[in-house]
Amino acid sequence: MNQETLDLITNSIKSIQDYPKPGILFRDVTSLMEVPEAYRATIAILAEKYQDQGITKIIGTEARGFLFGAPLALALGVAFVPVRKPGKLPREVIAESYELEYGKDTLEIHKDAIVAGDKVLLVDDLLATGGTIEATTNLVRRLGGDVTDAAFVINLPDIGGEARLQGLGLNVYSICD
Ligand code: PRP
Ligand code: ADE
């Protein structure tokens, strides 16, 4: 990734102070997707990093993980599996609850979406506490999937999510801070 491309991506992400709660600096990837060259470059960087690594499925976590996980799955020619907030998936699910930087939530996955031997890459827009991706890792591992990598557009390094995920045995990659 060259510096010009990195600057394009970084400068496309707007930051909003005190959203959704006082004290939170919200990093808004919708502004990145409004710049087609920045969005395309983001997916291209992730595709280059994860091609030829034997990945069989990409998981994106609702909602913003869909925005990067699904195009990456198409670019790599592998399956995309959504992890969703409760009550949204129609087949049999398993669930995990977790804490957010600004709340608490539960995630679900279709029980038959992962099979033993799947090599799974987790994708989300942003890493903060790591709670979302820890819960997603737990879901995939409960179904017998092999999760070794998690990729983000943005890492908020001061919040500690990277160390938390490394503690679960994940390789963590992010395009920018
Ligand atoms: C945001 C973001 C990540 C998560 C990061 O999602 O898209 O999934 O928080 O925080 P963490 O590392 O502390 O878990 P959010 O739950 O706000 O839902 P959304 O994607 O539906 O907006
Ligand atoms: N999810 C958790 N923390 C966030 C932040 N600071 N900006 C955007 N999304 C988030």
Image: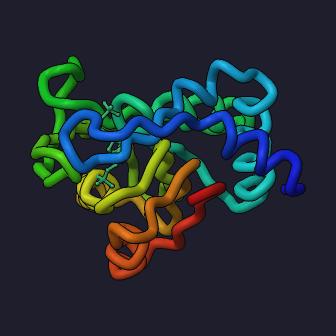
At 38% from the left and 41% from the top, the residue drawn is: 26
Q: Quadrant of residue 167?
A: bottom left
Nearer the observer, 34 or 80? 34
Residue 123 position, x and y percent, is 50, 47
Figure quadrant of the N terminus = bottom right
User: Is 90 located above or below residue 175 in the figure?
Assistant: above
At 75% from the left and 58% from the top, the residue drawn is: 49
Q: Quadrant of residue 151?
A: bottom right
Residue 81 seen in the current view: no
User: Is 147 located above or below residue 86 in the figure?
Assistant: below
Residue 63 position, x and y percent, is 37, 29
Residue 15 position, x and y percent, is 48, 39
Figure quadrant of the C terminus = bottom right
Q: Is residue 132 left or right of residue 73?
A: left
Residue 21 seen in the current view: yes
Q: Is residue 102 left or right of residue 168?
A: left
Residue 156 position, x and y percent, is 44, 60
Q: Is residue 75 left or right of residue 159?
A: right
Q: Quadrant of residue 38?
A: top right
